[in-house]
Amino acid sequence: MTSILERNKNLKQPVKKTREEYAQDALYREVWEDVNNEKTEQFLKKYWRYIVGAALGVMIIVCGIQIGMRMHYASKMATAQAHEAALASMDAGALANLSRNSNGATADLAMFQSYLIDKDVKKLEDLANNAHTHDFKDLATIHLASINGDKMSAEELEKYLSGMDTKSSPFFYMSRLMIAEKYLAENKKEQADKFLDIIINDGDAPDSISATAQMLK
């Protein structure tokens, strides 16, 4: 059996470079570095305006984002403080103004709170038509239905509350119960039972609404 030492002897040993070859390699590296430096210098001379412009553009964008975030945060803080102050003083007018000058759920909440203070139905109508969020739109609509329901027929009420005929609305079950009660008031039990059954047969229905539906059934 060939020993390890014998096999190692048969392996080709790396050829050592001569002093002249090392010197030649060093010269190649130096020339290559000079060429690269010269190319880099030429590139910078040719495109320095674009490079500087791009760098400035990035700086402007970053600074703009930071300033925008700070202004947005400051605006949010000011809105929250104004909301808190208006609510503490029960100032319906200030809440309404805050709603008109802000957006999103904050604006809708301020307008609804303003209505709760002064009972101005026009504010509910404004929310029902122009609310920023669907939930507050439905909240205003359900309140208007309670206020104006006596003037509507059951069919009109059903049509008025049709936008809540989906479980995505937080007032899905409440609106179904209101329609059923209206049909019962008009002695239309068959139509009423259709809506009562929706509530009774739905395991997700709130206990209080389900219990009321079963009682009416």
Image (cartoon, helix red, strand yellow):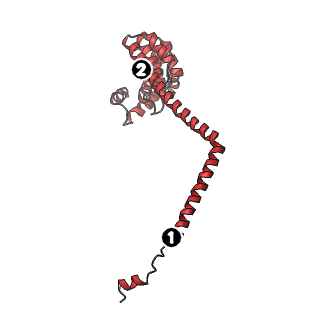
Q: Where is residue 193 in the image (x, y as percent from the top left)?
A: 43, 30
> Residue at the location (39% across, 11% down)?
90
> How busy is the neighbourhood of tag 2: few (under 14 within 10 Å), some, or many (20 plus)?
some
Q: Of 131 and 18, which appears nearest the observer? A: 18
Q: Distance between the residues labelled 1 and 2?
A: 79 Å
Q: In this view, does 183 lie above or below 123?
A: below
Q: In this view, does 185 lie above or below 202?
A: above
On the image, numbered disc 1 is attached to which residue? 19
Q: Of 136 and 48, which appears nearest the observer? A: 48
In the image, taking residue 200 as reference, residue 130 lies left or right, namely right
Q: Where is residue 25 in the image (x, y as percent from the top left)?
A: 54, 65
Q: Is residue 44 above or below residue 104?
A: below
Rendered-image quadrant of the C terminus = top left
Q: Do the residues labelled 1 and 2 touch (CB within 8 Å)?
A: no
Tell how many labels: 2
Res 51 → quadrant: top right
> Residue at the location (47% across, 74% down)?
16
Res 109 → quadrant: top left
Q: Using the image, tell me which numbered label, if any, was put on residue 136.
A: none
Mark 1 against mark 2, which lies toward the viewer?
1
Q: Using the image, tell me which numbered label, if any, was put on residue 80.
A: 2
SS label for mark 2: helix
Badge 2 amino acid: Ala
Badge 1 amino acid: Arg
Q: Position of residue 165 (x, y in %)?
A: 48, 31
Rendered-image quadrant of the N terminus = bottom left
Q: Of 32 and 163, which appears nearest the observer? A: 32
